[in-house]
Amino acid sequence: MTVYTVNPDLDLVLERTVDVPPELVWRAWTTPELIMQWFTPKPWSTVACEIDLRPGGRFDTTMRSPEGEEYPNSGCILVVDEGSTLVFTSGLGPGFRPQIAQGGFPFTAVVRIEPDGAGTKYTAVAIHADESAKKSHDEMGFHEGWGAALEQLVDLMKVR
Amino acid sequence: MTVYTVNPDLDLVLERTVDVPPELVWRAWTTPELIMQWFTPKPWSTVACEIDLRPGGRFDTTMRSPEGEEYPNSGCILVVDEGSTLVFTSGLGPGFRPQIAQGGFPFTAVVRIEPDGAGTKYTAVAIHADESAKKSHDEMGFHEGWGAALEQLVDLMKVR
């Protein structure tokens, strides 16, 4: 997965350069206590997170709406390239078990972290089964949501 | 995946000891020209196979019925532990892209190959999303089909 070729018809891509070194971005993405502080754009929150950082391991989060309703998500980690690439999917659960995706469509996320000066070139790709899933994810606010979450990640890690 | 804990409510397991060394069983499972000779119990046949042996790589086969109808299947390789463990799934396609499974339900297959004297302890596990998928796969003849295919693999590799 070092080179991932984006399919513009099916994938959504968020690309940013941020002022935080790659190792802190990696730590923010792979440490449950940190995920809970940045993963969900306010006023939503992430109230639980469990990560077993290996292929086949769980990537579980529970999001809470401003009204207090909770939405658990269980996913499966596929690739762990320490410090540079994390891939996980909602199409499988822990132990690579197929699962019916919550939220209507499954997607696979590729998070690429590359050095850029003292900061990080950050690329997040959401990979969908078909154009309608891509469109739904886009309309749900993929770019705004993942962008706002990244800003929270940067704010959190800058003070560490 | 060195230790995979079977869930008897959701998984199907075929376990056999065969009179072929582990390296030949591995080669039979990972070489398209060989797959085409043993993968499908006769009178069905496998008329095409493409394997990109790495996590995220394709595991594609096309089966042909005795009547000549062709059934292409595209899957994604998840784990390659050279000579001992192969994991792939029909819940994702090449590049980890989620896909709607052909045949009604997705499953993940774990193939474990362990030395047993001069032969091989062979374990194949099919992992399903829920009990109904397990039941469907069982009723489709998982044990008979995978067992007959394994016998073809053994016959093929014994003469090599």
Image (tube, coloured by chain):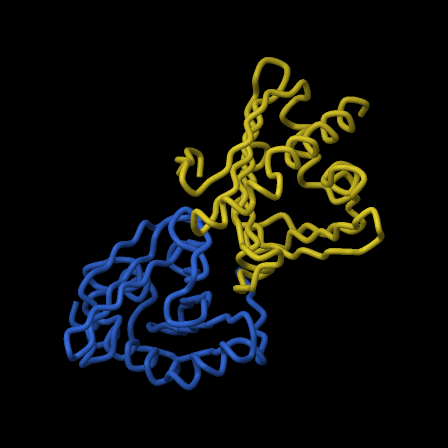
Chain colours: A yellow, B blue
- Can residue B81 be seen here? The reply is no
Left or right: B122 in relation to A77: left
Which residue is at 38% across, 79% downward? B17
Which residue is at 52% across, 47% downward? A108
**Residue sticking out furthest to the front:** A139
Q: Which quarter of the picture shows residue B41?
A: bottom left
Residue B68: x, y in percent? 15, 74
Looking at the image, residue A67 lies above or below residue A7? below
Residue B151: x, y in percent? 27, 79
Looking at the image, residue B94 lies above or below residue B75? above
Looking at the image, residue A97 lies above or below residue A121? below
Residue B86: x, y in percent? 41, 60
Residue A1: x, y in percent? 44, 39
- Can residue A154 be seen here? The reply is yes
**Residue sticking out furthest to the top:** A117
Q: Which quarter of the picture shows residue B121?
A: bottom left
- Front-most of A7 and B95? A7
- Front-most of A78 and A151? A151
Give the position of the C terminus of chain B as an image quadrant: bottom left
- Front-most of A59 and B86? A59
Left or right: B27 in relation to B56: left
- Tell me how many marks there are: 0
Looking at the image, residue B139 lies above or below residue A145? below
